[in-house]
Image (cartoon, grey):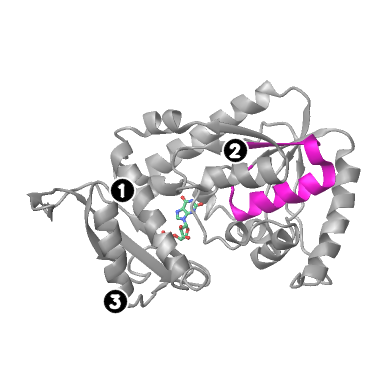
Amino acid sequence: MEVCKRPETMQRITTPELAEAFIAEQVKEVQAQVGDKKVLLALSGGVDSSVVAALLIRAIGKQLVCVHVNHGLMRKGESEQVIEVFKNQLDANLIYIDATDRFLDKLAGVAEPEQKRKIIGNEFIVVFDEEARKLDDISFLAQGTIYPDILESDGVKAHHNVGGLPEEMNFELVEPVKLLYKDEVRVVGKALGLPAEMVDRQPFPGPGLGVRCLGAITRDRLNALREADAILREEFAKNGLAGKVWQYFIAVPDFKSVGVRDNKRYEGWPAIIRAVNTTDAMTATIEEIPYPLLHHITERITHEVEGINRVLYDLTPKPTGTIEWE
Ligand code: XMP
């Protein structure tokens, strides 16, 4: 990340017209910087890397090589969406790596949250580095650095930067949205034609579902979490909560309780719903989900998801709870 300051005269990008002007200017700048060389980008599917990818495709087309590493901890349908949008619709030069087994094998038996984060962050670098070495004529590395990353680069949030790449990767950086705030990145993404559900996404931690499958991750519990989370997202979207609630997800702890399904004893994990509102993630309040919707979500998750037999709603604000469970 290159540290620099946003000029005080720079206008806040709030409209499609301002976005188009920004895009046109950046396209020129990137073309001038890159020439006919190749640029590598780790494309997670998050807002920032997706907008950088779309912008660079506009500027340099196939000279951009996107690498999407699926660490097996993505939400349901996310990697598929990256392939659909970038490979099929935008005709990007996209390398897709399904590294699920590598990540889950490394994580097997590891219960300590910070250890899990470290393993995921390190393995990401190893996998990405391996791919970069297979490509021989890359000169630049593109990154989805945004202005708050520069303002916050005081070390406090260092552990949040899963996907941060090693310094010794000797590429010149291309960081076209580094002076933009998040809301501006979204406006630019829409102007570039990215789908709303990609551009307006809720925040999703780098270690993904890895920190929501609590304790030592197992494949069956991770699958249950992914399915339950997909139901929660579907119901929030259908009921007008998706655009309103800042962050919402499921966490699944590693213990079971006794229950009953089809008149038989059915031991399963509980699915814990978290739905919070905040402006800066330092404190958070709880969304008042209507009871009928909570009942409906409970009914769906307990009947449709293998392994889950109870649904709980976490009413704890931050503080005293953090937003994530681990
Ligand atoms: P907490 O749990 O600290 O979360 O209240 C605050 C915000 O940070 C996100 N979060 C992370 N993001 N890597 C990330 O990229 C991480 O390891 C990580 N841990 C928490 C969390 O989702 C929330 O938005």
Using the rendered view, name the quadrant where residue 177 is placed. Answer: bottom right
Judging depth in this view, the residue of 172 and 79 nearest the camera is 79
Quarter holding residue 317:
bottom left
Q: Is residue 47 above or below residue 183?
A: above
Q: Which residue is mark 3?
A: 291
Classify mark 1: residues with Cα within 10 Å, few (<14), some (14-19) or many (20+): many
The image shows residue 212, relative to residue 232, as above or below, that is above
| Image disc number at residue 214 | 1
The region drawn magenta spans 43-68
Residue 2 in view here: no
Name the spot of residue 63 as percent of width and height, x first.
Answer: 80, 35
Q: Residue at x 61, y 28 (%)?
A: 129
How far across and down, in percent of the image, does residue 226 sit? Answer: 38, 48
Q: Residue furthest front?
A: 262
Nearer to us in this view, 170 or 228? 228
Q: Is residue 108 above or below residue 142?
A: above
Q: Is residue 291 left or right of residue 114?
A: left
Tag in front: 1 or 2: 2
Q: Going from the N terminus, do you reach mark 3 or mark 1 first?
A: 1
Asked if ligand 1 lies within 8 A of label 2, the reply is: no
For disc 2, the marked residue is 68
Q: Nearer the viewer, mark 3 or mark 1?
A: 3
Tag 2: amino acid: His
For residue 52: magenta? yes
